[in-house]
């Protein structure tokens, strides 16, 4: 029986010069793939490497967001300086459209409607729109009308990217509008009767994350504007913006602006961040009681001011508000950066102040003329 040469692997050898011989010996080399155990080990190693790399990636992203935020806040500081160069002083934190008004307080802080926020006009953020490349919004704003007029609210319900911190969780535009100021017309308090100014067409104020410093004490005390220990570069109650000469502590020792946070949903009763509403984008140094200092990202005190959302149950630091409180309230500088907040100073410099900053040093940085020496910060 003849062997079938097709059934065996072939190899060629030289038998004699010029003659090839077929070799039918089998190749004994074995080839095999990865076992299941080996595959699982490789997957486990990759998982460990990803786990080690992820925190570094997240840290790099946060560093980029913090840097981006610092750049945007620096632009806000530059816009404030440009306004100061033109007008000779910083913009007021807010103004009244009522010529009889000598001061403004939050809704229940004064029984005279001529002195209340019922007559509130433009905020500091409105005044610097031309210097934030928002000429269209600026040209459309009517400074003779109320902040809550329908015509002006068409501007102030707009989201302005230059005033948004990229580290703040995204809030869908319109989902956290401040609509609460309307209640001052429907249920006024005090020894007066309607009519009050019309707010027909008002929808609500859009939110932002950058705020100006109204001093080392409360949000809305008019007396702070004449008290050197507490007076800040801005005031809502006194409708004030400081001229350079008033910053006697030195421009490198005075904070003009920082960050605040606003609620992620359901912000219709929470004024924090409402950039077009006087008092909405402001922060201060103390809450209820002069001993409570609101250091950056403080956990010791909730934000406590008029038009807050009355939510005392949410444990996340920046989302709580203590309800209506006019002259006695306060809002802290807060951010979603790890360990502190970005600040811009009166000399235009930008600093990142940590949560652990000395409280005494911090409130000294908020006052423009307290005469105290500021150490390292």
Image (cartoon, rainbow, N blue to C red):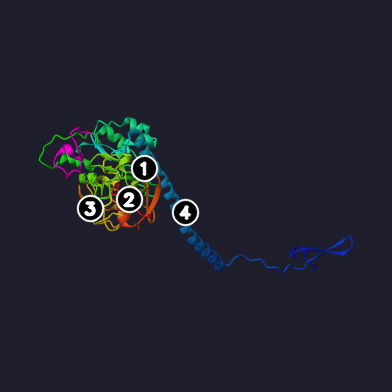
The quarter in which the N terminus is drawn is bottom right
Kindly indicate whether the residue at mark 1 contacts the one at mark 3 (C-beta within 8 angstroms): no
Disc on res. 322: 3
Which residue corresponds to the image point at 48% horizontal and 55% vertical from the top-left? 57
Tag 1 residue = 163
Extent of the magenta region: 97-117
Kindly indicate whether the residue at mark 2 contacts the one at mark 4 (C-beta within 8 angstroms): no
Tag in front: 4 or 2:
2
Mark 3 or mark 4: whose residue is earlier in sequence: 4
Residue 141 vs residue 352, the one in the foreground: 352
Mark 4 or mark 2: whose residue is earlier in sequence: 4
Q: Is residue 111 magenta?
A: yes
In the rendered image, residue 135, in percent from the top left (x then y), is placed at: 37, 32
Label 4 to label 2: alpha-carbon separation = 30 Å
Crowding near pointer 2: few (<14 within 10 Å), some, many (20+)?
Answer: many
Label 3 to label 4: alpha-carbon separation = 35 Å
């Amino acid at each position: 029986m003849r062997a079938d040469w097709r059934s065996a692997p072939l190899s060629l050898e030289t038998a004699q010069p010029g003659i090839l011989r077929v070799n039918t010996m089998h190749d004994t080399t074995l080839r095999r793939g990865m076992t299941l155990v080996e595959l699982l080990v490789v997957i486990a190693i990759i998982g460990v490497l990803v786990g080690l790399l992820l925190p570094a990636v997240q840290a790099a992203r946060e560093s980029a967001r913090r840097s981006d935020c610092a750049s945007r806040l620096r632009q806000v500081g530059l816009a404030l300086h440009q306004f100061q160069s033109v007008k000779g002083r910083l913009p007021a934190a807010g103004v009244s459209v009522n010529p009889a008004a000598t001061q403004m307080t939050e809704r229940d802080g004064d029984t005279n409607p001529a002195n209340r926020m019922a007559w509130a006009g433009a905020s500091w953020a409105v005044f610097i729109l031309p210097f934030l490349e928002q000429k269209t919004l600026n040209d459309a704003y009517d400074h003779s009308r109320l902040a809550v007029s329908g015509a002006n609210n068409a501007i102030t319900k707009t989201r302005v990217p230059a005033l948004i911190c990229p580290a703040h969780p995204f809030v869908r535009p319109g989902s956290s509008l401040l609509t609460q100021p309307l209640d001052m017309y429907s249920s006024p308090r005090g020894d007066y009767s309607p009519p009050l100014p019309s707010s027909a067409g008002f929808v609500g104020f859009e939110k932002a994350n950058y705020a100006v410093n109204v001093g080392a004490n409360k949000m809305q005390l008019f007396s702070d504007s004449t008290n050197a220990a507490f007076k800040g570069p801005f005031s809502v109650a006194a409708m004030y913006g400081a001229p350079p000469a008033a910053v006697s502590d030195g421009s490198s020792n005075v904070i003009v602006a920082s960050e605040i946070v606003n609620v992620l949903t359901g912000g219709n009763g929470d004024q924090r961040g409402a950039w077009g509403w006087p008092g909405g984008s402001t922060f201060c140094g103390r809450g209820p009681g002069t001993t409570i200092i609101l250091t950056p990202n403080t956990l010791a005190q909730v934000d406590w001011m008029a038009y807050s959302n009355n939510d005392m149950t949410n444990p996340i630091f920046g989302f709580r508000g203590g309800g209506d409180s006019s002259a006695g309230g306060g809002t802290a500088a807060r951010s979603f950066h790890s360990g502190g907040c970005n600040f811009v100073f009166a000399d235009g410099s930008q600093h990142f102040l940590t949560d652990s900053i000395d409280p005494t040093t911090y409130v000294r940085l908020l006052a423009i003329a307290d005469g105290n020496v500021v150490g390292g910060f």
